Image: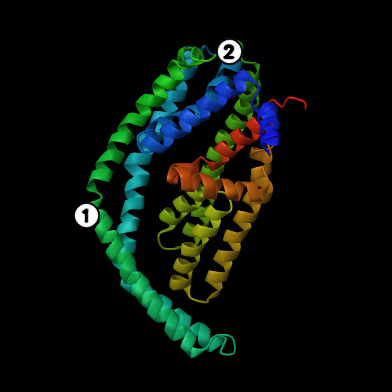
Amino acid sequence: MKAILKKWVGRYFSDEEALILLAIMLGVSLLFVMLGSVLVPILTGIVLAYVMQGVINQLQRLRVPRSFSVTITYLLFLGGFVGFLLFLLPRFWRQLGSLYRDLPELSDRLSATLVSLQAHFPLVISERQISVWVNLLSDEATALGQWLLTVSISQLPVLITVLGYTLLVPILVFFLLKDKDQLLSYCLGFLPEERPLMHQIGSELSGQMENYVRGKFLELIIAGLVTYGLFAFFGLNYAALLGFLVGLSVIIPYLGIAAVTVPVTIVALMQFGLSSDFFYLMAGYLVIQALDGLVLVPILFSEANNLHPLAIILAVLIFGAWFGLAGVFFAIPLAILMKALLSAWPRRPV
């Protein structure tokens, strides 16, 4: 057994550069675990800089000097960021407050809808089941209302922290774009001069990561806007809030859209009941999700390295357990990193 273990270690861990890379990865992982919440604005800034670097590259291809490209791109970002804070965020907040106030009425509507379901399908749904569901719904609505009230009072320090991060992120993005070359040169100075393995992994990872981050950002905007347009067309309550949640859900593959479909269905069912509007709206929503998965995603991620759906779900669960919400958001980039590492890791013949 000892000989087998020694042979395995000699095959996979005999390369000095690989050991240095492994130590760096362990150190970075430990840093994330210890300082996860502190690193959130930095990670957010890096992601946004990744997105805007594509715009800068396009402007430079048109022979626009880099300094002007950075300035134009940053001003566009800053305008969108300020517009989101001044116009969209207050609207989401108002709709969230409206949802809290309407919870008792919404609970009563859903209870009435469940009773009508039993009348339509008496052989499938019994009165006892309806009674259990109505009681459960009432308890959950009460618990949700209490939780929202508790959060609004007890999470004031968190809101102050978020406000600080909101002011910090645009500053970080500016310097990440402006001093990109200097920052990269400084970070690379800590690595060995001869680093073929790291160079191979970095080259493979860079293109895939840029494609993923920019594609996901575009998918988020397109999915959110199109879904909001559908909800607004049917006059669905909380259309902006639900459209925003649908847009965010694309960040978490498979699990995100499954989770956000539940509130969309409940709100539509409470407002429209089992009417034709409900079925038309849900059909349109499912068509949008199908077009997103079958048309939009292949176009945006045509150059991305394919990951098996099971690998994606496992990545979301594992990195979410390790790094919390940040791990869920960055599960796919981390999975791409792991795949690039496993593909390029040196193996000595035995």
For the N terminus, the quadrant is: top right
Q: Nearer the viewer, residue 327 or 115?
A: 327
Query: On the image, numbered disc 2 is attached to which residue?
Result: 63
Residue 225, x across and y down, in percent: 50, 48
- Residue 165 seen: yes
Q: Nearer the viewer, residue 28 or 101?
A: 28
Compared across the picture, whether 149 is left or right of 20 comes to left
Which residue lies at the image location 31% right of the left edge and 73% below the top edge?
104
Compared across the picture, whether 301 is left or right of 183 comes to right
- Residue 223 seen: no
> Please, is residue 98 above or below residue 191 in the view?
below
Residue 181, x across and y down, in percent: 49, 13
In space, the residues marked 1 and 2 are separated at their CA atoms by 53 Å
Question: Residue 153 got which mark?
Answer: 1
Residue 113, x across and y down, in percent: 46, 79
Local secondary structure at mark 1: helix
Quadrant of the image occupied by residue 99: bottom left
Compared across the picture, whether 101 is left or right of 13 comes to left
Quadrant of the image occupied by residue 148: bottom left
- Most extreme residue toward the front is 2
> Please, is residue 258 above or below residue 49 in the view?
below
Which residue lies at the image location 47% right of the left edge and 34% below the top edge?
29
Question: Residue 258 got which mark?
Answer: none
Local secondary structure at mark 2: loop
Residue 98, x across and y down, in percent: 31, 61
> Please, is residue 86 above or below residue 107 in the view?
above
For the C terminus, the quadrant is: top right
Q: Tell me which amino acid carries mark 1.
A: Ile
Q: Tell me which amino acid carries mark 2.
A: Arg
Instruction: Tell whether label 2 touches label 1 (CB within 8 Å).
Output: no
Which residue lies at the image location 52% right of the left edge and 29% below the top edge?
25
Between label 1 and label 2, give the one nearer the viewer: 1
